[in-house]
Amino acid sequence: MKGHILKSIIYVTSACIVRNRYSPLWDLARNKPDMKGICKQLIRCIEIFVSRSFIQKCRECEKRTDNMIIHLLCFCPYKERQQHCLWKLIYELLGHDEFKRCSVLDTSSQCAYVLKLATLNSNLCFSHLNITKATAKLLSL
């Protein structure tokens, strides 16, 4: 179990943190002020996702969870409509076969995959802006 979590952490951080513990998301936020809020939100969510687990209470459903990001992306009943919209966007991007491979991963790996998709960027633009916005909206803490 811990091996899956460690692999998920490495997978997601390799996409959004580069040499010297610096995230290119900060460059994007600096050069595109309209994206600053989304960048800050995603970085905060990644910090929560990869940090040490502790029990928290969800503001929406009041259930206790040891990883708020996994809870919001996969389990919170009050976020069900937003979850459906996000997973539909991911399905449309990946196609049936790749989505099927993603859907059999454990929840930690699925969340890492979503966070990586949401943070992928090049030339100071998000690679999948609709997924980025849907993820940030769903994970608003």
Image: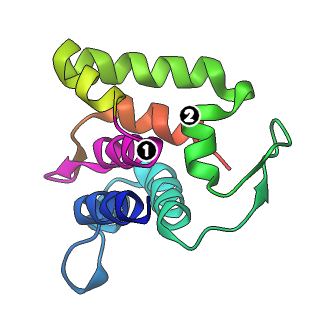
Q: Residue at x 37, y 49 (%)?
A: 112
Of residues 60 and 102, the one drawn nearer to the viewer in this rendering: 102
Of residues 91 and 55, the one drawn nearer to the viewer in this rendering: 55
Question: In the figure, residue 13 lies in which quadrant?
Answer: bottom left
Of residues 44 and 123, the one drawn nearer to the viewer in this rendering: 44
Of residues 68 and 45, the one drawn nearer to the viewer in this rendering: 68
Question: In the figure, residue 74 lies in which quadrant?
Answer: top right
Main SS class of the magenta portion in the image: helix
> Which residue occupies the extreme right position in the image?
62
> Which residue occupies the extreme left position in the image?
123
Q: Which mark is residue 60?
A: none
Rate crowding at label 2 as few (under 14), some (14 to 19) or many (20 or more) other CA atoms within 10 Å: some
Residue type, label 1? Cys
Looking at marks 2 and 1 on the same chain, the residue that comes earlier in the sequence is marked by: 2
Q: Quadrant of the N terminus?
A: bottom left
Q: Residue at x 23, y 46 (%)?
A: 125
Magenta stretch, residue numbers: 105-124
Q: Residue at x 45, y 25 (%)?
A: 86
Q: Position of residue 93 (x, y in %)?
A: 23, 21
Question: In what element is the residue under mark 1?
Answer: helix
Does 33 appear above or below 61? below
Q: Position of residue 90 (x, y in %)?
A: 33, 24
* Image-based side of 120 in relation to 57, left or right: left
> Which residue occupies the extreme bottom position in the image?
20
Does 141 appear above or below 129? below
Q: Which residue is mark 2?
A: 74
* Image-based side of 126 in relation to 50, left or right: left
Q: Residue at x 36, y 57 (%)?
A: 4
Q: Position of residue 127 (x, y in %)?
A: 21, 39
Q: Which residue is mark 1?
A: 111
